C-alpha cells in the first residue's frame, strides 16, 4: 500500500464504508472459525500464541470464539482499558477473556 | 499440561530470563506499549496526512459523558507534532505516560544489557499504594475531562 493508497482508503465515501463493513464481517467470521478450531488467528499463528479454554485447555469452538469477539465490545466501552488489561493482569486476560473464561498462552 | 497449571508454574520472571529483551513486569510492559504508541503518534500522521486516529470514545459516543482517557490519542499526536500546549489542553496526563515510557525504556535497555537488576515482585503494600495512586490519577483525569466538556 502506498501513502496515496492509504489516503484513498481513508476517504469517507459510501463505497469505502460498504467495503469496510463487508471486509470486517468476513474477517470476523473467518477469525472466529479459525480461532475456535485451532486456537489460532493469523496474528496468534505468527506470534505462536493459542486461545484456549481456561478450564479444559482446549480450543473453544467457533461459536464461543465468535462470542468472545463480540465480548470485546466491553473492552472498548471501558475507555479501551480492557484491551490493555493483559499488561498487568495475572492471567493476562482481557475483559472478554474473563467473560468467556479463556486464556491466551504461548506455545511450548 | 492443563492451562491452569501452566499459568501457575510458568513464573514470568523465570521465563523472562531466557530471552534477551522480554518485559517481565507490568511497568515494563506498559513502557513498551508506550513506545508503540509513540511510534504510532509519529508515524501515523506522516503516513496518512491525518492529524489523529479519530478514535471515538465509546462512552462519550453513547452517553455524552467523557471518560478519564478522553483526549489521550489527540494529546499524543499533538505532542508528537511539537504542540505541547495543545496536547496539554486535550489531556495533560499524556505527559505522565510519556515520562513513564521514557523511564521504562531506559530501564529495559539497562536490564537487557545486564546493567540493572531484574524486576523484583512488589510487596502487597506497594501494590496497594500503586493501585491507589492510579485510582487518584484516573479520578483527576476524569475531573479534567468532565470540566473540558462542560459537565463540571
Image (spheres, helix red, strand yellow):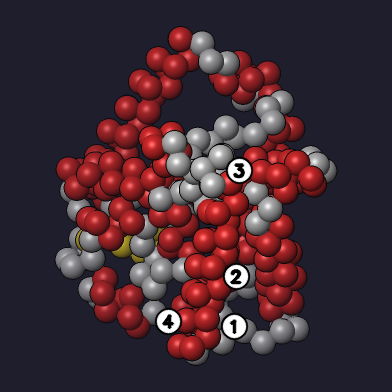
User: Relative to the observer, which residue lies in front, B135 or B55?
Assistant: B135
Q: Which residue is mark 2?
A: B28
Q: Pointer 1 and pointer 2: residues touching (CB < 8 Å)?
A: yes
Q: How many marks?
A: 4
Mark 2 or 3: in front is 3
User: Which SS class for mark 3?
Assistant: helix
| Pointer 2 local density, CA inside 10 Å: few below 14, some 14–19, many at least 20 | many
The answer to which of marks 3 and 1 sits earlier in the sequence is: 1
Alpha carbon distance from label 3 to label 1? 38 Å
- What residue do we see at 57% from left, 16% from top? A11
User: Relative to the observer, which residue lies in front, B127 or A12?
Assistant: B127
User: Which SS class for mark 4?
Assistant: loop
**Where's residue A57, x and y in %?**
22, 65
Q: Quadrant of residue B93?
A: bottom right
Q: Which residue is mark 4?
A: B11
| Pointer 4 local density, CA inside 10 Å: few below 14, some 14–19, many at least 20 | few
- What residue do we see at 70% from left, 41% from top? B77
Mark 3 or 1: in front is 3
The answer to which of marks 1 and 2 sits earlier in the sequence is: 2
- Quadrant assignment for the C terminus of chain A: bottom left
Which chain does the residue under circle 3 lie in?
A: B
Q: Are marks 4 and 1 on the same chain?
A: yes
User: Which SS class for mark 1?
Assistant: loop
User: Relative to the observer, which residue lies in front, A9 or B6?
Assistant: A9
Alpha carbon distance from label 2 to label 3? 31 Å
The answer to which of marks 2 and 3 sits earlier in the sequence is: 2
Q: Quadrant of residue B113?
A: bottom right
- Quadrant assignment for the N terminus of chain A: top right
Amino acid at each position: 500500500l502506498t501513502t496515496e493508497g492509504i489516503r484513498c482508503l481513508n476517504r469517507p465515501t459510501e463505497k469505502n464504508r460498504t467495503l469496510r463493513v463487508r471486509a470486517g464481517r468476513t474477517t470476523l467470521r473467518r477469525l472466529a472459525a479459525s480461532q475456535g478450531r485451532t486456537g489460532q488467528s493469523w496474528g496468534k499463528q505468527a506470534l505462536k500464541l493459542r486461545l484456549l479454554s481456561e478450564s479444559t485447555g482446549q480450543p473453544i469452538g467457533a461459536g464461543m470464539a465468535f462470542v468472545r469477539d463480540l465480548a470485546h465490545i466491553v473492552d472498548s466501552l471501558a475507555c479501551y482499558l480492557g484491551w490493555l488489561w493483559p499488561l498487568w493482569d495475572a492471567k493476562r486476560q482481557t475483559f472478554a477473556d474473563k467473560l468467556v473464561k479463556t486464556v491466551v498462552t504461548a506455545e511450548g | 499440561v492443563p492451562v491452569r497449571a501452566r499459568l501457575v508454574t510458568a513464573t514470568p520472571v523465570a521465563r523472562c530470563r531466557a530471552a534477551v529483551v522480554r518485559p517481565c513486569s507490568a511497568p515494563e510492559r506498559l513502557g513498551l506499549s508506550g513506545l508503540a504508541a509513540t511510534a504510532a503518534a509519529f508515524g501515523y500522521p506522516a503516513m496518512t496526512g491525518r492529524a489523529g486516529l479519530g478514535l471515538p470514545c465509546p462512552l462519550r459516543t453513547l452517553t455524552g459523558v467523557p471518560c478519564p482517557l478522553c483526549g489521550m490519542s489527540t494529546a499524543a499526536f499533538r505532542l508528537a507534532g511539537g504542540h505541547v500546549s495543545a496536547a496539554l489542553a486535550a489531556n495533560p496526563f499524556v505527559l505522565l505516560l510519556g515520562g513513564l515510557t521514557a523511564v521504562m525504556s531506559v530501564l529495559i535497555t539497562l536490564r537487557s544489557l545486564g546493567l540493572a537488576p531484574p524486576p523484583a515482585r512488589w510487596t502487597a503494600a506497594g501494590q496497594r499504594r500503586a493501585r491507589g495512586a492510579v485510582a487518584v490519577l484516573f479520578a483527576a483525569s476524569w475531573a479534567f475531562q468532565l470540566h473540558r466538556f462542560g459537565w463540571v
